[in-house]
Image: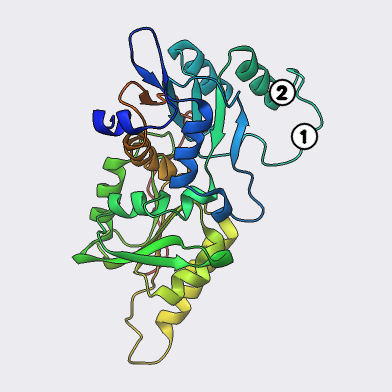
Amino acid sequence: MQNSSEDASAAPGVVRDATGAGFPTLAETVGVLERLYPPETAQSWDRVGLVAGDPEQQVARILLAVDPTLAVIAEAVALGADLVVTHHPLLLRGIHSVAPTTAKGAAVTDLVVNDVALYCAHTNADVADPGVGHALAAACGLSTTEPLSLPEGQELGRVGDLDEPVPLRQLVERLAAALPATAGGVRVSGSPEAPVRRVAVLGGAGDAEFPAVVRSGADVYVTADLRHHPALEAREEAVARARLGGARAEAPATPYLVDAGHFASEWLWLPVLRERLAAGLPDSVSIAISTVRTDPWDFVVGAAPPTDPGDPA
């Protein structure tokens, strides 16, 4: 999507090429990004912002992706992109060399040699309104939501109610239809026919927020990267709560769990980013979503529904 010509003419300091088309500088483009996703709203441990690029270079083409992998950077070079905007940071943890003998070094080298800038919006995009959580909530059918938790004073995740209860399978099928295809698909813990209405969501790794999910009263938690022990313990606690008291003996063991995959659950934000970024940039700037699947898994073997009853609904 691109913004209106009126917005383009109002963009300050835009560089004009020989045809009169306006191209913003990288600094101006970063300014738009940081108005949408202020760096100061990122979590204290995060590393967001401009990673590579000359602030004075022109930006005519932008590529959006979840991860700044070598394949994504190669796609940007082939596309002729001047800027790659990713959700995940390239340099989250300290490194001691950018020699191309390592993946991080090769990525930095490919960016610099090909004059491709890199900008990362991570937890500042998670807590934005609209941000990653809103995109995932919308894919689940939620329209009105509230924050799931408030780490460091910032809203993280979303929780809200569907218009009416639906079977767990129906909710997951709706979500799966909106997600990019991945080898692992969507994993679910709970009876397919169990009714759900209150839905909590958190894009990316979410098993640290189980206490907030329980407090929210959610029937189901949609997130990613659910590890064996935290997920199993969460389901066991749900079963234990359902067993309390004779009158509650038949209570459902909620929240059910949905693991949508890290890449897939956060990819949903990219169309939102494209729309918001286009609204702040001249029409002359083209914005594309990467076609590279950065989910690390390529195939599965032996996946089949379990034959044992598992946890009760």
From this viewpoint, which residue is outermost toward the top?
A: 18
Q: At which x and y percent is residue 77?
A: 51, 13
Q: Pointers 1 and 2 in contact (CB under 8 A)?
A: yes
Query: What residue is rendered at 41% in x and 47% in y?
Result: 260
Residue closest to the eye, 247 or 60: 60
From this viewpoint, which residue is outermost toward the left?
A: 164
Residue closest to the eye, 223 or 170: 223
Query: What residue is rendered at 43% in x and 46% in y?
Result: 36
Of labels 1 and 2, earlier in sequence is 1
Q: Residue beneath label 2, please?
A: 105
Horizontally, residue 71 falls left or right of residue 182, namely right
Query: What residue is rendered at 56% in x and 28% in y?
Result: 118
The local crowd at label 1, few if under 14, some if 14 to 19, many if 20 or more residues have their Cα within 10 Å, is few
Residue 173, label in figure: none
- In the image, residue 261 above or below residue 286: below
Q: At which x and y percent is residue 48?
A: 59, 43
- In the image, residue 109 above or below residue 237: above
Residue 95, label in figure: 1
- Count of numbered circles in the view: 2
Q: At which x and y percent is residue 286?
A: 35, 22
Residue closest to the eye, 171 or 16: 16
Q: How far apart, in angstroms, are the residues tagged by discs 1 and 2? A: 9 Å
- In the image, residue 214 above or below residue 103: below
The secondary element bearing badge 1 is classed as loop
Q: At which x and y percent is residue 209?
A: 52, 64
Q: Name the quadrant of the C terminus.
A: bottom left
The secondary element bearing badge 2 is classed as helix
Q: Amino acid type of disc 2?
A: Gly
